[in-house]
């Protein structure tokens, strides 16, 4: 019997985005999740639980191969054996141990960059102290997204607790559906709609060629939620739509344009793929043309309505072009009943554990954490210098302030 379920798989065009933003062919765009488990962890049960998740989720058995002439392709193995990695964090204080964890994470990412290897993920259990551990997961973005990372951890916890998780559609089945959708009448119709939506748009970002700087996903600023949430409730608008508008407004003010396009990353799953591990994130195009004479309070509602009109084209994934900006909005919390037997798992939001590489797009990641919104950016440092980033931060915060405190026309807003 062959060791492969599929020896060579062609990725659907929707995943071209991930290839496009990866410089060269020896580096990967990685994502992560980390939880702190306060309580005793039985290592034998943990190892069996991870192995079960590997066996039941084909995305965990994808590997990258290279032909003799250098072409990359993907295969799916029948089996990958989990080889546990345990590490004791060094330091006297919690801060010192977290610094050590960040150093270990960076080493994991560095090894992952050469992804011609036996697996596309890393799972490590770090010891903070007696009955105090951190479960760290690193995945290649081809096989996982932010939603999937916490699905993986949730499935490990369920298997650890002996809970049967209902089976969902496999990642291979999902990819096959996307390939079929590409050539279907509905797929072709939506492609024409997306082309029409982007007609006449002129990109205003020119990336350098040759040697380029790099940036990780770094913290930019934090906003308090209560006042923004109050405005959102009163105007029947979600926090996500409010933030989408603020990003449009910030980009427009900084780059002196009134026509901007943002790709919206959406990892929501449904139907037979509700708990499928894989890169199931779709992208919606938000193109917004601003009338400088209108009030910010008017424009935010127009921006929301534009999104609703585009959302029906969600299935098209990341195939849209051109697009220089992306927003990813996440309620960054593990379900409250996430337990490893009697040990409670809590999400770790320390952005020092994240990692990214140079990409031809700026990603604004917005994390909703309790009563705070935490903003992180992934960007090319040649384009997004400290001065440009400071301006984007200034106008983003100013846009939120216009909505909650002192409404202005967009023209007045740009003069702040």
Image (tube, rainbow, N blue to C red):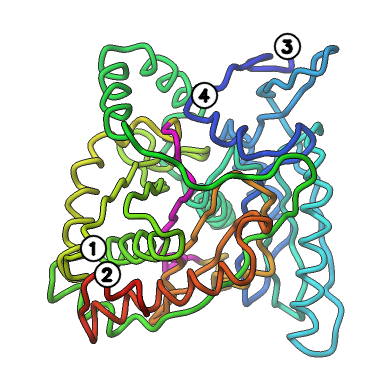
Left or right of 194? Residue 154 is: right
Q: Choose between 158 and 188: the one closer to the eye.
A: 188
The residue labelled by disc 4 is 172
Neighbourhood count class around disc 1 (C-alpha, 10 Å): few under 14, some 14–19, many 20 upward: some
Neighbourhood count class around disc 2 (C-alpha, 10 Å): few under 14, some 14–19, many 20 upward: some
- In the image, is residue 321 part of the stretch drawn in magenta? yes
Can you tell which mark lies on residue 2? Answer: 3
Secondary structure of residue under mark 2: helix
The image quadrant of residue 166 is top left
Q: Which image quarter holds the N terminus? A: top right
In the displayed structure, 337 sits above or below 402; it is: above
The residue labelled by disc 2 is 411
Residue 281 percent across, percent down from the top left: 44, 41
Residue name at image x 39 percent, y 36 percent: 273
Secondary structure mostly seen in the magenta stretch: loop
Neighbourhood count class around disc 4 (C-alpha, 10 Å): few under 14, some 14–19, many 20 upward: some
Mark 1 and mark 4 lie on one chain; the one further toward the N terminus is 4
């Amino acid at each position: 019997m062959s060791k492969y379920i599929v020896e060579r798989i062609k990725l659907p065009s929707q995943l071209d985005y991930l290839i496009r933003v990866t410089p060269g062919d020896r580096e990967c765009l990685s994502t992560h999740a980390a939880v702190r488990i306060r309580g005793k962890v039985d290592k034998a049960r943990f190892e069996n639980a991870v192995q079960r998740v590997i066996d039941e989720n084909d995305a965990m058995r994808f590997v990258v191969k290279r032909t003799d002439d250098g072409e990359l392709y993907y295969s799916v193995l029948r089996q990958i054996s989990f080889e546990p990695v345990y590490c004791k964090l060094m330091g006297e204080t919690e801060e010192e141990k977290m610094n050590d964890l960040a150093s270990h994470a960076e080493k994991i990412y560095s090894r992952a960059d050469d992804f011609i290897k036996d697996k596309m993920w890393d799972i490590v259990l770090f010891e903070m102290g007696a009955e105090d551990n951190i479960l760290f997961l690193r995945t290649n973005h081809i096989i996982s997204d932010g939603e999937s990372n916490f699905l993986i951890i949730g499935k490990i916890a369920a298997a650890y607790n002996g809970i049967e998780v209902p089976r969902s559609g496999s990642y291979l089945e999902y990819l096959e559906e996307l390939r079929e959708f590409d050539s279907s009448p509905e797929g072709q119709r939506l492609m024409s709609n997306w082309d029409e939506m982007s007609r006449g748009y002129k990109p205003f970002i020119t990336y350098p060629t040759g040697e380029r700087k790099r940036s990780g996903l770094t913290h930019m600023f934090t906003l308090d939620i209560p006042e923004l949430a109050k405005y959102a409730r009163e105007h029947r608008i979600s926090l996500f739509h409010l933030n989408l508008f603020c990003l449009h407004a910030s980009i427009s003010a900084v780059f002196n344009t009134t026509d901007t396009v943002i790709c919206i990353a959406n990892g929501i799953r449904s139907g037979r793929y509700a708990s499928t591990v894989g890169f199931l994130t779709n992208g919606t195009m938000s193109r917004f043309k601003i009338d400088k004479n209108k009030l910010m309070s008017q424009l935010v509602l127009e921006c929301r309505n534009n999104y609703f009109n585009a959302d029906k084209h969600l299935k098209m994934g990341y195939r849209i072009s051109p697009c220089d900006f992306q927003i990813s909005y996440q309620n960054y919390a593990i379900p409250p009943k996430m337990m490893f037997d009697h040990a409670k798992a809590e999400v770790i939001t320390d952005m020092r554990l994240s990692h990214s590489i140079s990409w031809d797009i700026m990603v604004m990641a917005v994390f909703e954490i309790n009563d705070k919104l935490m903003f992180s950016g992934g960007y090319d440092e040649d384009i997004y210098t400290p001065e440009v980033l400071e301006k984007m931060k200034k106008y983003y915060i100013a846009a939120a302030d216009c909505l909650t405190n002192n409404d202005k026309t967009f023209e007045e807003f740009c003069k702040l």
